[in-house]
């Protein structure tokens, strides 16, 4: 999809207008919530500053996920994580050595009781469901 078209869709949503039908969104639509409107405007500004061209996967290749991403944690990995954490090894380094993402390592440390969950208990400052 062309970034200019994507921006037009985002702008319509930010104005509370259905981008396909042109009708006003219902009052209870999440697109009418102030934080969502602000987020849509921020995305629109970012798209305005983005270089022209197609927004395709080929245009932005992604790095391969770590080898153990999404896999269950073994007791040996839990033990290695606890030892590394207690030794003060940086989390990014621990994540690389365990083949995990930094986020996965942080979440596992919370589950193991080594660190406290962030205030609010969820990602992006929202309470956990």
Image (tube, rainbow, N blue to C red):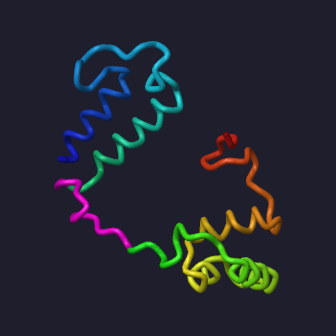
As drawn, 107 above or below 92: above
| Residue at x 53% of width, y 67% of height | 70
The picture quadrant where one finds residue 65 is bottom left
Q: Is residue 57 magenta?
A: yes
The picture quadrant where one finds residue 17 is top left
| Residue at x 34% of width, y 40% of height | 44
Q: Position of residue 103 (x, y in %)?
A: 60, 65
Q: Position of residue 101 (x, y in %)?
A: 55, 71
Q: Position of residue 29 (x, y in %)?
A: 46, 20
Q: Is residue 11 magenta?
A: no
18 left or right, relative to 74 = left
Main SS of the magenta part reads loop
* Total marks in image: 0
Q: Position of residue 20 (x, y in %)?
A: 23, 25
| Residue at x 53% of width, y 76% of height | 68
In front here: 7 or 58?
58
20 left or right, relative to 26 = left
As drawn, 96 above or below 129: below
44 left or right, relative to 89 = left
| Residue at x 23% of width, y 19% of height | 21
The picture quadrant where one finds residue 129 is top right
Q: Which residues are magenta?
A: 52-63
As drawn, 117 above or below 106: above
In front here: 2 or 73?
73
């Amino acid at each position: 999809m062309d970034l200019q078209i994507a921006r037009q869709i985002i702008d319509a949503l930010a104005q509370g207008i259905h981008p396909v039908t042109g009708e006003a969104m219902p009052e209870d639509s999440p697109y009418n919530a102030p934080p969502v409107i602000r987020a849509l405007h921020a995305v629109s500004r970012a798209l305005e500053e983005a270089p022209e061209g197609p927004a395709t996967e080929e245009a932005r290749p992604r790095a391969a996920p770590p080898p153990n991403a999404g896999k269950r944690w073994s007791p040996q990995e839990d033990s290695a994580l606890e030892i590394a954490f207690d030794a003060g090894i940086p989390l990014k380094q621990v994540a690389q050595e365990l083949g995990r993402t930094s986020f996965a390592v942080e979440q596992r440390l919370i589950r193991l009781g080594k660190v406290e969950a962030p205030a609010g208990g969820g990602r992006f400052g929202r309470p956990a469901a």
